[in-house]
Amino acid sequence: MLDLEAILLSLKLAFWTLVLLLPFGIWVGYSLVRAGACKGWIEALLALPLVLPPTVLGYYLLVGLGGGSIFGIPLVFSFFGILLASLLINLPFAIQPIQRAFEAINPEIREAAQVSGLTAWQTFRLIELPLAWRGITSAAVLTFAHTLGEFGVVLMVGGAIPGETKTVSIAIYDKVQSFDTSGAGLLSLLLLGISLLAIALSYGVLGTRKSRDR
Amino acid sequence: MLKITIAQKLPMPLQVSLECLSGELHALVGPSGSGKTSVLRTIAGLRNPSTGHIECDEKLWFAGNDLRGVSIALSPAKRSCGFLFQQYALFPHLSALENVCIPLQNTGLNTGQKKSTALEWLDRMGIANLASRMPIELSGGQQQRVALARALARQPKILLLDEPFSAVDTPTRQSLYKTLAELRTDLHIPILLVTHDLREADLLADRITVIDEGISLQTASPQALFQKPRNSRVAELVGISNIFEGVFNAGNLTWDGFNKQFNVLDKGKIPPGTPVAWVIPPEGLSLHSESGATRIKSTVEHISTLGQIAVIQLHINGSEHKISWEASAAEVRRLSLDIGKATYLEIDEKKIHIMPLRPINDPRRFRG
């Protein structure tokens, strides 16, 4: 049977990760284009979740946050805990495509905006943000899809509490463990569908826009 | 009026001063990498020099020096420069009309007024019918007109043009010449044009500033520049082919490597025995079939005919010197010139222009 509770929880987690991480990703991605000497170090640090095994990140979060709380809500084995973990592990997916998009803007375009009398904020809002929108959409799709599929770090920090921390990926694992292969298959099919849609969005829709925007 | 004096050592040496009057089209000419575009970018405020003074219509845009640092440096947005980029730099996500609306953002106009003003500018550039096109749907020449409309929409105090003719075909270029000529009389603002094409500068500009390796060498009208280059480097850069060296001694010029002297007037500024460079413009040369007291025996070494124009290279007998002479094909026939044939060259002393061997701001200029 379809585990609706897990699906809704996964969607809630992906939604909040996206809402919190995307503005941050735009700010960091934009700032990194102009960053000075320490740019390489910051980039390396932000890319760490790409190579770090999720269980390792989960372990450090578990040890580091264990017993800690925000506004009385415990940070481990809670939705807040897995949200925090999800924000961290998604940093490179949210920042890198946006940074690349801002980097791809011809510096002369920015200068043209400056000599046209635009303020820095107007240049960002009217010129740079619209030109970087493909990178931003791609970051959003990647972050959303990646959050839905995240397993290791969520399990380490959140465990598998139904309705609180048991996301679709963990539900699939649980179902296989309890020999409910058809339930696991159904949920897997759902994640496969979402992943395909995400890929189609970032390659198909964005691809056709590309030729017009160039 | 625009007045600038800028100097810096890094990232590339620059030492430029020039003035551009309202309604004047002033060309900045020099070889690639000579710092022409850097000068334009400095005026626009896209980069700042270490020392300098930039003033437009008696308003200070930049002031600074090495000792006290920068005291005034207005941002590009506050300088009121129309800047036409070499590659146009149109905003690719905006239509032609929206591109021209961008400089009107902070003018206090409402959306409707902005659109009608932008449309007026596009109309003035003859492309109002293309207002809704995206930049990618426009030809190079059309893109340039949109970029020009965008540069002018804010009614700037000066117009800066960075190599506007380098990437367009001949018909587009011709129509742009016409547009520029019209704008010049209509706008009455200083227009600074960067180009590496001297013929173009000669054709369009009221005055030309020659820049080489970041240093402004001479500012003069095109005619004065070709007839009286300030030094041998300017002569070389403006494409004068007959440049020679000699020694100047109180009104008397001795040609190096050839036993010939000329009486040349100067302002008495050159110390006796000074090695100098000298040039002779084409109108100071004539060829004759008979010898004469002041005529120099030469041999025709090479004739290249280009349509109705022939360039004749002569070898001055008894020396290593070669001199080139431009004439009509008819003149070549009249003198029955042919390779290897002897002829007699007359150099009009009054047309000789002598100058220091080195640039004017080089302290060694008269020491050879």
Image (cartoon, coloured by chain):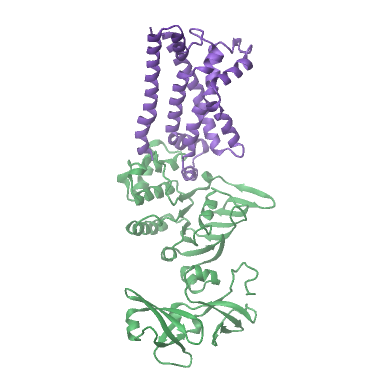
For this view, does B22 lie left or right of residue B173? right
For this view, does A178 lie left or right of residue A79? left
The answer to whether residue A80 shows anywhere in this view is: no
Q: Position of residue A23 (x, y in %)?
A: 50, 26
The answer to whether residue B327 shows anywhere in this view is: yes
Q: Is residue A109 above or below residue A142?
A: below
The hue used for chain A is purple
Letter of the green chain: B
Q: Position of residue B71 (x, y in %)?
A: 64, 48
For this view, does A16 lie left or right of residue B133? right
How many numbered circles are shown?
0
Q: Report which quarter residue B364 is drawn in.
A: bottom right
Q: Is residue B13 above or below residue B95?
A: below
Report the residue that reaches farthest toward the right: B67
Q: Quadrant of the C terminus of chain B?
A: bottom right
Q: Position of residue B36 (x, y in %)?
A: 51, 57
Q: Report which quarter residue B346 is drawn in.
A: bottom left
Viewer-closest of B269 and B57: B269
For this view, does B185 lie left or right of residue A44? left
Q: Position of residue A83 (x, y in %)?
A: 53, 17
Q: Is residue A45 above or below residue B338?
A: above
Viewer-closest of B217 and B127: B217
Residue at image x 59%, y 68%?
Answer: B359
Viewer-closest of B15 and B3: B15
